[in-house]
Image: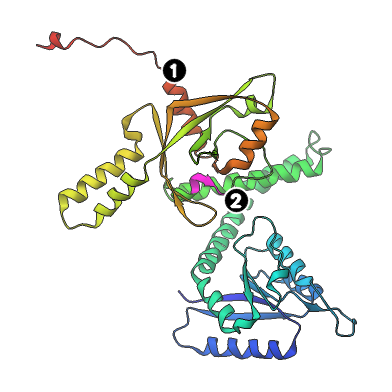
Amino acid sequence: MKFSIRLLIVEDDAAAINEWGKHFERHNAEDDKSFEIIPTFAESFELAKEAIVATNFDAAIVDLRLKVPGGGGHHNADGNEVVKLLANAEMAAVAIYTGQPEEAQLPNGTSKIEVIPKDDGLETPMQWLKGQGEMLFHIQKVGEIIRSKIALTFHGSIWPRWKNWSTHSRFSGANSDLLISALTRHFVSHLHADLLESTNEVAHSEEWYFVPAISSSGISTGDMIRNESGAIEIVVTPRCDIAHSDKSITLQLAQCEDISVEWNEAHANLTVEDKKTVEKAKNKISSFIKHRSKNVIHFLPPMFNKDGNIEGPWFVRFDCIRSEKKSEELLASLNSQRFATLAPEFLPALVERLGGFFSRIGSPDYPSHHLE
């Protein structure tokens, strides 16, 4: 794994910049390094902003207190503004390296930003950077694939169709923001379909979820809730019934049965030497994934939560659904308790199985004595 990390260093002290440069030279001279560091130095918020516009950075290390231009040596807290800008503009690993760690302000949704006290010396942020190497390598590869796929999609599908949309008389007067939003969604849907097809529609378990749930939307079908008792439930009420008070007076939540103990035992048995035990474990895992061939449950794979801990897998129990009278208070409470959302590509399978479970009529059993 040999690659380069484009690193932004936001620091206004000349001696510190010189010391950083020496560390990078020593690192890049190492024979066993997994990546090379390409540094860019910025001494103020304005210079950092210009650098971010000009370069796609993989990582950044930011000092909080920067000198005020023409301020006679006075400092400000513009480093927090740089961090906010990075969080909104870059797919980059970010660390705050400061002598005032208590002044660090982490933007919402960016809990993984590291705060490193300057008392620890430069070796600590260097070790942090090395620890990000594998993730940054994969993020770079993701970017390369996306750019390649977008180019093919643009020339093969998007441009021929949208050129007509934007010039056709029916659409020429349409709201520009609406067209841009539609074009963005069209790009993303093409890209997702193309990438899924390229892997023969095999998905990673993490693709099942949005973690954390999308904060800009209200409670919706597929939201996963951790209630007051710690139990996990999933919202199964149709989103249109949630959004409109005149359609339904209640909201339904299905219990998620934690099957992690059996799941983990089965996976542990995959590594034993006894072939029968391994085969039995494989069959058990396959049975889980196939919902144990029962209509009453739906399998959801394990996930990493926002703290990096594994939760699940679960069986959604269609025979354990509770109804709550819909109210603004209930929706607000559930909104504070939700920790994940089932991704749109995987929600229809849950809804389809739920509908299939309740639409069954069944028939009397054929008496066994007729078989004798």
Task: Quote the CA–CA distance across marks 2 and 1.
Answer: 41 Å
> Which image quarter holds the N terminus?
bottom left
> Residue 120 at x, y = what percent?
60, 82
First reached walking from the N terminus: tag 2 or tag 1: 2
Q: Residue 105's quadrant in the figure? A: bottom right
Q: Is residue 74 above or below residue 256?
A: below
Q: Is residue 279 left or right of residue 20?
A: left
Name the residue rendered at 52%, 45% in the picture: 209
Task: Check disc 1: other Cα within 10 Å, few if <14, some if 14-19, many if 20+.
Answer: few
> What is the image's colouring?
rainbow
Q: Quadrant of residue 117?
A: bottom right
What mark, if any, has residue 359 been given in the picture?
1
Query: Where are the magenta residues, as a range?
Result: 207-211
| Three-letter residue code for mark 1 | Ser
The residue at which mark 2 appears reads as 153
* Image-based side of 299 in relation to 133, left or right: left
Residue 333: image tag:
none
Front-most of 185 and 225? 225
| Element type at mark 2 | helix
**Which residue, as the protein is rendered here, is positioned at the far left?**
372
Residue drawn at x 68%, y 56% is: 108
